[in-house]
Image: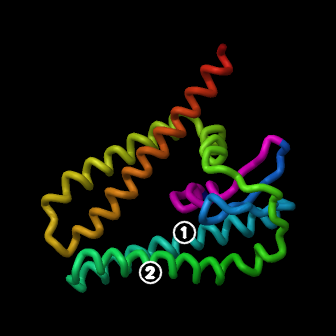
Amino acid sequence: MKFSFTSYIAQEAFLTLATGEKLFRFGIPFGKPYIVPNFEIEKRLLQKTINFVKIYFSGMFLTLLIVSMLQIDVLLTIIIFFVVAVSLFLIIYQFLFKKETSKLQRFHQKITLKATYISIAKKHGYFSITTSLFTTILFSGIAIWALPLSKGWSKLGLWVIIFLMIYSVIMWSYILFIKVSSRTRQEA
């Protein structure tokens, strides 16, 4: 499979346990993931996840543009954006994954968010993690710098970007911390 930004995001929906068992967890990280029994199903789920990312990001971008052009109250804009985001997620999920996941068995326990970040730290090297961290810091700085320059209609977009960037900086910092901590434990 060709590597791209969407495939990079889509691959994060898969976890490999220490036992070698492959799990698929899509969306909210607090539910019980699905057990992926073979490579063929994994490949199908990965392609569907890539398609989901493309459709969802396109839909959210389009929603952001449309809502920004309406020039309505900022609170109402945020509520509309949130409702569309959740609705779009649920509709696309039902369309792409419901039939496939209904055939899969659920894993016996929930996987914690910490376990997810540990999995990401194991999956990626220092270069990838630090590049992701510095990229999010760069984009956060650009978004914060652009906020005072924006007109009223684009402030929602900038606030959404700032929120996502702050979350990403915290997440990638934590993943880097896990990576460094695991290395120092191995060396000790």
User: Residue 148's image quarter?
Assistant: bottom left
118 relative to 36 in the view: left or right: left
Q: Quadrant of the N terminus?
A: bottom right
Q: Is residue 40 magenta?
A: no
Figure check: 86 above or below 172: below
Q: Earlier in the sequence, mark 2 or mark 1?
A: 1
What is the residue that sits farthest to the bottom in this orientation? 70
Figure check: 36 above or below 168: below
Category of crowding for the residue at label 1, using alpha-carbon neighbours closer than 10 angstroms: few (below 14), some (14–19), many (at least 20): some
Task: Identify the residue shown where x is 41% and y is 75%.
Answer: 82
Q: Nearer the viewer, residue 78 or 177?
A: 78
Q: Which of the labelled discs sits on residue 25, or is there none?
A: none
Task: Identify the residue shown where x is 60% and y is 64%.
Answer: 28
In the rendering, at what x and y percent does residue 101 appear?
76, 73
In the rendering, at what x and y percent does residue 188 appear?
66, 13
118 relative to 76 in the view: left or right: right
Kind of element beneath mark 1? helix
For label 2, the residue is 84
Task: Identify the residue shown where x is 60% and y is 44%.
Answer: 117
Kind of element beneath mark 2? helix
Figure check: 54 above or below 132: below
For label 1, the residue is 53
- Give the number of marks: 2
In the rendering, at what x and y percent does residue 178 appear?
57, 34
